[in-house]
Amino acid sequence: MSGQLKAGQIGPFSDDIGLDFEPSNNWGHALVAEAGPKYLEWTRRGYTFTARATAAQALIIFSTAVNAPTLWNPSDSGKIVVPIRLQLHPVAVASAVHTGVVLGFQGGCGAQAATASPILTFTNKAPTNNCPFTNKVAKTKYSDAVVTFTAIPSTLQDIGMIQNVDGTPATGGFSTLSYDFDGTVALGPGDIMSVFGQAASVNTFWMSIIFAELPLAVGGLS
């Protein structure tokens, strides 16, 4: 019978044809073949974007309520925002201070910055679609340097990325400054995620956050 699997679909498949059968091996396991690299399917559908800083900047300590690079999934987006990768490039190494990178999180932030709102100011730098051919524009907002919170975002997690400068700044080096989220963080409508330092640092970095906007399934997050 045609469309058996599509009748019980999970997620939006508006432009695809449902399968009539699912191949399996003689142990009853589904057979799956990769059609390309890890994120190709999301990218070709126009789901993936890059938010990149407009200037190199220092990591703000997590106890500060201003100017931390922030992804904001507006409450009216109709999307789930999935961070994929965080990448930092050191620019000016002026200190040998060691500091880790931590994520801040806050929900219920609405869709617009305003007086008495959770987000007071926010200068948006529109993320770039990673498959420009799709002509899809991000619902997600990104501010790399001009954002003010009414309350300091809560610390969500340490991500194991550190600034590791040994000896003097002139002779020191950095660990690999790239972090793959691997699906461990997702932002619902109205949620924000900020990038902080565990300690204040005067060293500056260029920063890119690669993320995906996925359609919010009927019924929301349940």
Image: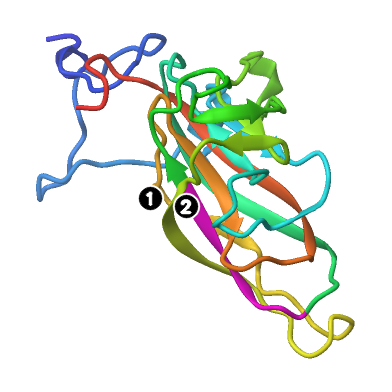
Residue linked to disc 2: 181
Which SS class for mark 2? loop
Residue linked to disc 1: 184
Q: Are marks 1 and 2 in contact (CB under 8 Å)?
A: yes
Q: Quadrant of the C terminus?
A: top left
Residue 140 placement (x, y as % from top left): 56, 25
Residue type of the residue flagged with mark 1 = Thr
- How far apart, in angstroms, are the residues tagged by discs 1 and 2? 6 Å
Residue most toward the bottom?
167
Main SS, magenta residues: strand
Image mark for residue 56: none
Depth check: give the residue in front, 22 or 99: 99
Residue 220 placement (x, y as % from top left): 26, 20
Q: Residue at x 39, y 34 (%)?
A: 107
| The quadrant where residue 16 appears | top left
* Above or below for 78 versus 185: above
